[in-house]
């Protein structure tokens, strides 16, 4: 992340931005062939992660990157709707890291409705 000292604006690392743009394009292509998720619905996720090497990874940062890509691709309207799920690191090596992602709507109840019900 680069920050412009004059404006304070944040600019992503160029390598990450290229990766993000490629992922967003792939997500848009895949989403066009599937039913869309209902708007405003909380979502359960399941991620199978196949690492390309044995290096340790910052999973919360990886998850955040995936959420931003889903939002940028228009698959979810707000990444705060991704509320529960599992992340499984699989064994075996691939030529590049692979992530299989499943998203499931939890119902028509919005986060505000959930908060109101629990108040």
Image (tube, helix red, strand yellow):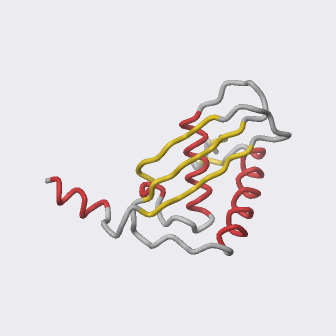
Query: Picture quarter containing residue 111?
Result: bottom left
Q: Is residue 119 left or right of residue 79?
A: left
Report the residue that reaches farthest toward the top: 55
Query: How far across and down, in percent of the image, does residue 23 sit?
Result: 72, 56
Residue at 55% from the left image edge and 40% from the top image edge: 87
Residue at 39% from the left image edge and 66% from the top image edge: 41
Q: Is residue 78 left or right of residue 101?
A: left
On screen, 11 above or below 71?
A: above
Where, quadrant-wise, is the N terminus in this rendering? top right
Residue at 42% from the left image edge and 48% from the top image edge: 84
Q: Is residue 97 left or right of residue 69?
A: right
Query: Picture quarter containing residue 52?
Result: top right
Report the residue that reaches farthest toward the left: 119
* Residue closer to the observer: 92 or 87: 92
Report the residue that reaches farthest toward the right: 95
On screen, 110 above or below 59?
A: below
Query: How far across and down, in percent of the image, does residue 57 sit?
Result: 65, 29
Q: Is residue 111 left or right of residue 89?
A: left
* Residue closer to the observer: 69 or 117: 117
């Amino acid at each position: 992340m680069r920050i412009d000292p004059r404006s304070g604006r944040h600019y992503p690392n160029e390598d990450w931005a290229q990766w993000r743009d490629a992922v967003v394009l792939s997500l848009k292509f895949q989403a066009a062939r599937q039913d869309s998720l209902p708007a405003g619905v909380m979502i359960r996720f399941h991620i199978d992660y196949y690492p390309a090497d044995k290096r340790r990874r910052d999973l919360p940062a990886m998850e955040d990157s995936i959420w931003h890509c889903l939002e940028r691709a228009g698959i979810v309207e707000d990444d705060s709707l991704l509320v529960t799920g599992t992340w499984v690191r699989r064994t075996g090596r691939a030529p590049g890291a692979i992530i299989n992602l499943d998203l499931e709507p939890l119902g028509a109840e919005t986060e505000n409705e959930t908060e109101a019900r629990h108040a």
